[in-house]
Image (spheres, rainbow, N blue to C red):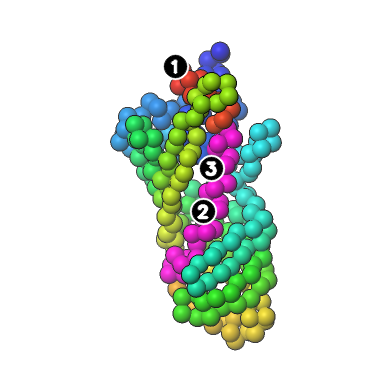
Amino acid sequence: MSSEAKSVLAMLSILLLLFCAVVSVLSNPAISLYQCKTDDDVCATKAVNLAYPLILEANEEIGAESIDPLFQPEIEGNLSILKFKLFNTTVTGFKTCSAENAKYNDEQQTLRIDIVCGAFTLSGSYDINGQLIVLPVQGNGDYVLTTKKYRLIIDLELKTITGKDGKTYRTVKNFKMEADPLEPVNYDFRNLFNGQKDLADTVLKFANENWREVAHEVQLPVFVANIKKMVKNANKYLKTIPIEEYTQQ
C-alpha cells in the first residue's frame, strides 16, 4: 500500500468518530483520533475540525448524500401538544459549523462533540396543528426558518462489527444530542390559520419574540432527522474500510 493511500485511510479513522467521510487526496499525514489519548481534548478537537468539512460531501459511488445543502423529503414532529410535518425541506448551514471541544474515550468507544454553527436556513412547506406553548396554531403552506449562531452537543456511541469478509469495521451505533440557539431565530410560516392575518400575526409575533423557548419546544425532531442522515452517510463509508487498514502506521 502506498504512503498516500495509508494517509487517506488514517484520515478515515477521524471521520469514523465524526460521522466520517471520504478523503480523496491528502498530501500530508492525517491526524487520527486513534493517536489521541483518552481525555486529550486538544488533540481530539483538532482531529475533528480537520475532518469535519469532508463529511459534507456527496459520494454517488457509495450512496452518500450531500449534507450542505441537505434535502429532507419529510420531517415529522409528534410532540405532546403539537403535531407538525415539514415537506421538501432544504437545509443549509452545516458548512458554518466547527467543534469548540471534542472528548474522545477509546475504551468506551464514545465521542462527545461541542459544535458551534454560524447560521442555518430551512425552507419548504409545512402542516401544523396544536398548541405552540400557550397559543393555538394551525395551518399549511410554505415556510422559511432562519437562525444565527447555534450550539449543538452530540454524543456518539460506536460499535465494532465483523463483516462477511471476516474483517472488523467500526460504525456509529447511536447518538444523542442537544441544541441551543445562541442568537435570535426567525420563523416565517405562511398561510397560518388559512390566511387569517390577525391570528397568524399573533402567533408569528409570539414565536419571534420568544425564539429560544419556541426553538427548545419544537427543534429536536428536525435536528435528529438531519443528524440521522449524517450517521447514515458515515456508516456507508465505514463499511468500506476495515479497521486494521486505517489504523496502520
Q: What's the mark number on residue 224?
A: 2
Spatial CA distance of label 3 from label 2 is: 10 Å
Residue 232 covered by magenta stretch: yes
The amino acid beneath tag 3 is Val
Spatial CA distance of label 1 from label 3 is: 27 Å
Q: What's the mark number on residue 97?
A: none
> Mark 1 vs mark 3: which is more N-terminal?
3
Residue at horizontal 49%, vertical 30%? 161
Q: Nearer the viewer, mark 1 or mark 3?
A: 3
Where does residue 234 sit, x and y in percent of width and height? Answer: 55, 38
The amino acid beneath tag 2 is Val
> Mark 3 vs mark 2: which is more N-terminal?
2
Q: Which residue is mark 3?
A: 231
Q: Which residue is mark 1?
A: 249
Residue at horizontal 67%, vertical 68%? 142
Mark 3 lies on a secondary structure that is helix
The amino acid beneath tag 1 is Gln
- The one of 224 and 181 positioned closer to us in this rendering: 224
Q: Is residue 191 above or below residue 24?
A: below
Quadrant in which the N terminus appears: top right
Locate residue 130 relative to residue 43 in the image: left or right: right
Q: For the magenta stretch, what is the residue range?
A: 212-237
Q: Are marks 1 and 2 in contact (CB under 8 Å)?
A: no
Q: Is residue 138 above or below residue 51?
A: below
Q: Residues within 10 Å of mark 2 (few under 14, many from 20)?
A: some
> Mark 1 vs mark 2: which is more N-terminal?
2
Q: Main secondary structure of the magenta part?
A: helix
Q: Residues within 10 Å of mark 1 (few under 14, many from 20)?
A: few
